[in-house]
Amino acid sequence: MRMWDNVWLIVKYDLKRSRWGLLVSVLMYAYFCFFTVFITREQFPLDPAETAGRLGTVADIMLLTSMSCVGFAMTGDYRVYWRSDIFSKRLLFLRQLPISVRELVAARYVLIAINTAMLSVLYFVPLFLFGPLGRLLTPLQIVSFALTWVAFGVCMSVMYAYKELAGSGKSYFLYCCVWAILLIAIPVLTSLLGFGFVESSVEAVKRYGALVPVIGAVVAAVWVGFWFRKTERRIRSRSFSR
């Protein structure tokens, strides 16, 4: 019971100090959703006489990049962390308190879950209300599509959390840059092979329904467990000497 007391203490503190960051994230995801609506209207025309546009790659990039960071609120710390190494300093401070490493990691994951739930609702609800997918899919398929992408977002978020807690600000920045390039390059390359992430996920939920997010949830649960233990071990062995 004490463990969760400490976890919620950290979570509540982080939520309080990230209030403006949450507002920035809300505006950012509203912006993402706005453009995704218009992109999917071109990609999935409702009029049978219209041909699908060639924005599938753009839609893939939008979904992959936006959902990869859905577990994070864009606080002021993210503006200068590669110079200030603020996350390492904060971790060092917390390690000096009567809080276990497991509690630190659990608190980070709870915060990821809260941010993911809030920003996913903000992103997907308007997308289905104003975009074509809300009319192409049944309610079950809509939920399945959203949860499938949420599972992807959770998997990416725990990887970012590992780098945030496991290394220096510079290494974290480099890691984010590499993934930013990959999340653009991968859909470009797969589009040349005739594969689209958004289109394929739409077809998958149309065909298999709730089975798709169930598989995604199982994969995400195993993935989260793996990275939780990996992050915990890395923090225990990490040296903060300069």
Image: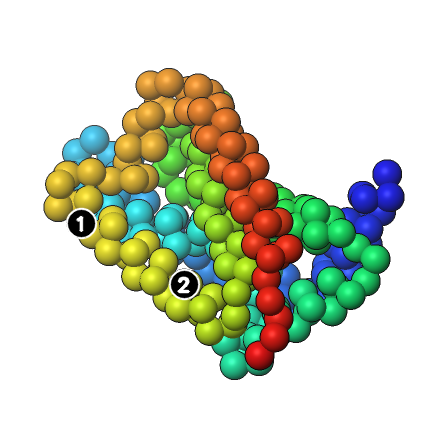
Residue occupied by mark 1: 189
Which residue appears at 57% of the width and 54% of the height?
234
Q: Identify the amino acid type marked 1.
A: Leu
Q: Residues within 10 Å of mark 2 (few under 14, many from 20)?
A: some
Residue 77 appears in the picture as rendered = yes
Instruction: Say which of marks 2 and 1 sits in front.
Output: 2
Q: Is residue 89 above or below residue 34?
A: below
Q: Identify the amino acid type marked 2.
A: Tyr
Which residue appears at 28% of the width and 33% of the height?
200
Residue 167, image x, y percentages = 52, 65
Mark 2 to mark 1: distance in Å? 21 Å
Relative placement, left or right, of 92 versus 99 is left
Residue contact between numbered discs 2 and 1, judged by CB atoms under 8 Å: no
Residue 147 appears in the picture as rendered = no
Instruction: Point out the tag, 2 or 1, that comes first from the N-terminus.
Output: 2
Quarter containing the N terminus: top right
Residue occupied by mark 2: 175
**What is the secondary structure assignment of the residue under circle 1?**
helix
Residue 128, image x, y percentages = 45, 39
Q: Quadrant of residue 181?
A: bottom left
Residue 83, image x, y percentages = 52, 81
Work out whether residue 178 or residue 40 is closer to the camera in this orientation and state it.
Answer: 178
Q: Is residue 191 above or below residue 95?
A: above
Work out whether residue 201 or residue 8 is closer to the camera in this orientation and state it.
Answer: 8
Q: Quadrant of residue 195?
A: top left
